[in-house]
Image (tube, helix red, strand yellow):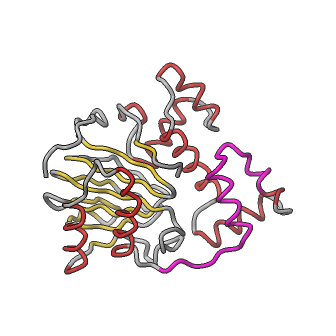
Amino acid sequence: MTSRITTRLNDSGEDGLSRVFERGALHFSRSQQTSPHAHYAWKLHVGIDAPVWVRTRNGLTSGRAVVVPPNLEHATGAIGWSVAVFVAPGSRGTAFRGTPPFDLEMLSGARCRRLVDLCRHFEPTARNDTPNFVDELARIALDSPATPIDRRVERSLQRLRESPGTPLKTIAQAHGITLDRLSRLVSQQTGLPLRRHAIWSRLMRLMSAPPAPTELAAAAVTAGFSDHAHMTRTFRAYLGRAPSEFRSAPDVIAAW
């Protein structure tokens, strides 16, 4: 694997790229590392040159390919090049939640070898092929079956993706139910609180069109955060990085 992409992504010094597309994202990087966080999406992390490592409440483990379910606090890193893909729960054949005990899964055998081989041949410059590439990875690694959800929940989550700043009470009223009722439905059927869906949508919108440094405070409030510090804490909690660590915006093929 050669350094074909030289955009400096963050202050840790890694080279690579981040790419966002409909209900998915990809991070192709070298020698990356995150602080503890719990993101909204399903995550597949594949080590191209060497095993990746993941630390959870159960300790440190490593392997060439690991699946991290939604809402699991973890820190992760890699030596050499790796590919991390993120898939929205309920999309690309995935369920909205993992199978108890909701821990990570280290992949092995032929399935692992196939994933490493696919990532080894990933071509960063083939921009529009990225969604298809992630679809193939998801079919191999994220084999939890999707389950139908209440139409009101489905439409509410779609509204959040399209308009992250929409007040949650307004979304509930559009379906003729109270916010408490909608919140319960979302938690019961997706395993994630409604507010967590909303915050992730706001973060992805900011990632897709990051403001200039002088506009960060105003952008934070507009996105629904109390201030810049609140936005920074939320970035770290969900993505394992602060906004200031990203030196360049992701390549956005389509809004998440």
* Residue at the spot 51% in from the left edge and 74% down from the top edge: 95
* Residue at the spot 63% in from the left edge and 72% down from the top edge: 189
For the record, the magenta segment spans 145-171
Closer-to-camera residue (60/98): 98
* Residue at the spot 58% in from the left edge and 63% down from the top edge: 192
> Please, which residue is most extreme toward the right here?
176
Q: Left or right: 49 with respect to 27?
A: left
> Residue 230: image x %, image y %?
54, 35
Q: Left or right: 16 with respect to 87?
A: left
Tell me where residue 55 sits by quadrant: bottom left
Tell me where residue 101 sits by quadrant: bottom left
| Marker count (numbered) | 0
Any magenta on residue 38?
no
> Residue 19: image x %, image y %?
39, 48
Any magenta on residue 169?
yes
Residue 63, relative to residue 7: is it above or below?
A: below
Q: Left or right: 15 with respect to 201?
A: left
> Residue 35: image x %, image y %?
34, 46
Tell me where residue 218 sits by quadrant: top right
